Amino acid sequence: MELTRRRFMQATAATLAALHTDLFASHPQPLMIGFSTLGCPAWDWAKILDFAQAHSFSAIELRGLQGNMDLPARPEFQSNRIAQSKGEVAAKKLKIACVSSSAHLHDADPQKHREQIADAKRFIDLAASLGAPNVRIFGNNIEGPRQVVLERIASGMHELGEYAGPRGVTVIIESHGDFTDSPTLIEILERADSPHVGLLWDAHHTFVSGKEDPAFTVEKLGRYIRHTHLKDSVPSADGRRYVLTGRGDVPVRKQVEVLAASGYRGCYSFEWEKAWHPELEDPEIAIADFADFMKKLQR
């Protein structure tokens, strides 16, 4: 198995350079480039849309607005305002690629688990109203017997998938927390057993925490990937420190190339964790820098 994996990665690496010209220069359409609002926690709705348009982004990932992570409660998304907000997105020639919730499905306490399911459904309803294709949820932590936790998460995802499907939404679990390796994610997704569930590939986490080469991850999980988070980092005294795209040791370029080569047509979303790490570069710098990185990558 290890020999097969090594040969696959060697073959992929050998062909990436040859693929690059065909992949990007003659790509039938530009890659869908977006950013998460986690990276600009002080910006209002209008500034987010204006900045996205000015820097040639094609999509936005909603993850809180002005410090409020409870998106369904935001005034921009109330029944008397949501049609206007949706029109403002379209007027800027943008899309909402994902509505990212904080819901996690690992809780053993039945009441807490039901509360998380209910919260995820609120975000699914919001995504449906906005015409957004995806809602992110977490597995998050393995607390207790592994198989029991995985079954609980998979069962919750199946329920959410059945709720989301008729509304035109896919529920995607992020490769995050204790769920950053392909075998575990595949097990959950297969157990969830729904055409309305998929994966948010946080490519940073599967590389840094999961210790997986991007080619290996895409080979194993590519059929499930519906949305992608990209970011770069370097080792630090505390573990890792986020840096501007292309300045760290995360193979962001390869992650994009391998995923594009797989036929992926979803969003490549920049997740700059400014809301959690205020010491990071300001969004005016970091988000614009990501746009430049992705433009150069496609030339």
Image (tube, rainbow, N blue to C red):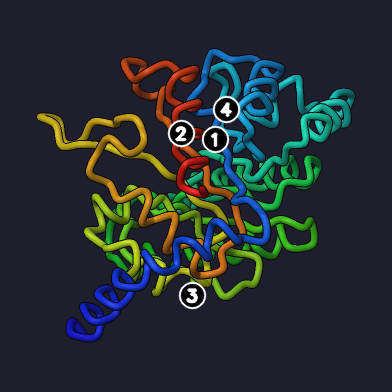
Query: Residue sitting at 40 percent across and 54 percent down?
Result: 175
CA gap, disc 4 and disc 2? 20 Å
The residue that label 1 is drawn on is 35
Answer with the quarter of the image where residue 194 lies.
bottom right
Give SS at disc 2: helix
Say whether marks 3 and 2 touch (CB < 8 Å). no
Q: Position of residue 9 (x, y in %)?
A: 27, 73
Asked if 148 appears above or below 140 in the picture, the reply is: below
Say whether marks 4 and 3 touch (CB < 8 Å). no
Residue type, label 2:
Phe
> Which mark is in front, 1 or 4?
1
Q: Residues within 10 Å of mark 4 (few under 14, many from 20)?
A: many
CA gap, disc 2 and disc 1? 9 Å
Near-viewer residue (150 or 202): 202
The residue that label 4 is drawn on is 64
Viewport quadrant of the N terminus: bottom left
Asked if 83 appears above or below 146 in the picture, the reply is: above
The residue that label 3 is drawn on is 191
Q: Position of residue 169 (x, y in %)?
A: 71, 55
Q: Position of residue 277 (x, y in %)?
A: 34, 22
Q: Which residue lies most toward the left here?
A: 237
* Left or right placement of residue 87 versus residue 66 in this view: right
Query: Residue sitting at 29 percent across and 72 percent down?
Result: 14
The residue that label 2 is drawn on is 290
